[in-house]
Image: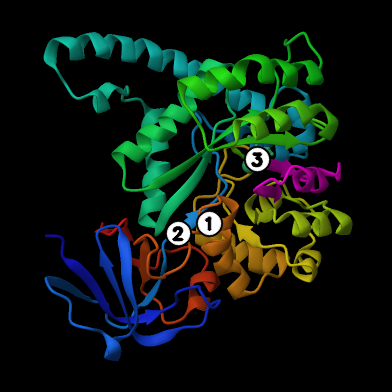
Amino acid sequence: MLPHLVFRNVHLCTMVDGIATLSHGAVVCLGEEIVWVGAENDLPAFDHAEEIDCGGRLLTPGLIDCHTHLVYDGNRAAEFEMRLAGATYGEIASAGGGILSSVAATEAEIALQENAEAELACAICETGEDAARMRADTPNHRAEEKRFRRLIDQGITTVEVKSGYGVRAETEAFLLNRAKAMTQQLPLDVYRTYLAAHVMPQDAGMSRAEWVQHLVDDDVDRVCAAAGFDAIDMFCEGIAFQPDELIPLLQKAQDLGVDIRIHADQLSDLGGAQLAADWHAASADHLEYTSDAGAQAMAAAGTVAVILPGAYYFIREQQKPPVDAFRRYGVPMAVATDHNPGTSPLNSLLLATNMAATLFGLTVEECLLGVTINAARALRRDERIGTIEIGKRADLAIWDVGTPAELVYNIGGNPLWLRVWRGRID
Ligand code: NIG
Ligand code: FE
């Protein structure tokens, strides 16, 4: 019989009512679910209970990082130095660096992996070793696993992971399968996004519209069959794809019934937010150049605004997202790391909240809604995760801090005391 896990003596921040807290609270989990929440004085007696005295620490929902590019190989430290010397992100990208340099590093590593795995597979046939050991043990693989482990160490219980550093269906499927393998090995939920229209090879020999058509006619179905995914994403930008070029991909995502997410209005206003709203996207992300009308359209469509201060900071952008317009029209705001090798090598979701507050003026409450329930909304999983409520998943984070504001206030460090994922204590 499963024990009831009783977390008592907590400073409870359920995120149901913003960052309102209740001292001397308790949360009870059974299996993967929360079965009781309230004041410790009202706690009923549970059969077969295991008690955890949390010493008055702050208990919140497990955090959700709803926008990352965690699966890639190599890094772009050299481009960082070029930008420090004066080159812009756009200039580096137009000269064949940027996303394409990560594509090259990733494709090269995957070729190595494929060879190593083929060899390992033969060895496994002979020795009967576990299939989980079929990943080659390379520095890149270890770096990637560390990126996932870091999330766990920082109280994150669900992460969105995008592909996008491949230009072949095989590579993209490989990356999405790598993300899936992490969920099989590590205590963490991974929502997987196929970032289909991210970049096209310089020698593609076709227009951008033709490239998108090629994705729609060929790659999307192959990636779907070989890996599967929860959403399709696309980069709507002057240095990437124009709104009208993306229509066939949006239609394809809609036909497949997967969520739509759009990297929108990051470097210029091409109407990406409006496009996201027109297609009822789950989220539009970045949004530094989004117009008032774009924000209004997102509100009407229920599209979540994912705010990514790490990229803004790292590429030294000057234009801030229209936070006031999002507030005025009631657009839910999420906050994420956008961890990626090019524009946001940011390894801390709490630091992203600090940046969202300091750089964009989000309140502490907006920041914490942004990494809990609004992040869950961006992933359309808000019925299961994002708040502490009876019937929701037992994903909790318990922090060595006195108030919710301290989570946002600190720069660096790790205040996590205990993490619970699907009712399992780490
Ligand atoms: O979210 N904007 C597009 N994609 C990534 C960065 C890509 C890269 O430079 O590697 C982003 O910023
Ligand atoms: Fe991104």
Report the side of 370 relative to 251 (left or right): left
Indicate which disc, 2 or 3, sits on the residue closer to the N terminus.
3
- What number is the disc on residue 376? 1
- N-term-proximal mark, 1 vs 3: 3
List x then y, in percent, for residue 270: 86, 41
Q: Residue at x 38, y 30 (%)?
A: 141
**Callout 2 crowding tier (Cα within 10 Å): few <14, some 14–19, many ≥20:** many
* Foreground residue among 274 and 364: 274
For label 3, the SS is: strand
- Residue type at numbered disc 2: Ile
Query: What colour scheme was applied to this rendering of the protein?
Result: rainbow
The N terminus, quarter of image: bottom left
Dot 2 falls on a residue whose secondary structure is loop
Going by the numbered disc 1, the residue's amino acid type is Ala
Q: Which mark is residue 260?
A: 3
Which image quarter has ligand 1?
A: top right
Nearest the eye: 87 or 366: 366
Residue 162 visible, this angle:
yes
User: Are the residues at dot 1 and dot 3 in contact (C-beta closer than 8 Å)?
Assistant: no
In magenta, the rendered stretch is: 261-285
Counting from the top left corner in percent of width and height, residue 158 is at 44, 51
Picture disc at residue 385:
2
Q: Residue furthest bottom?
A: 41
Q: Is residue 1 left or right of residue 41?
A: left
Q: Is residue 267 visible?
A: no
Q: Classify 10 Å Cα crowding around label 3: few (below 14), some (14-19), many (20 and above).
A: many
- Are dots 1 and 2 in contact, CB under 8 Å? yes
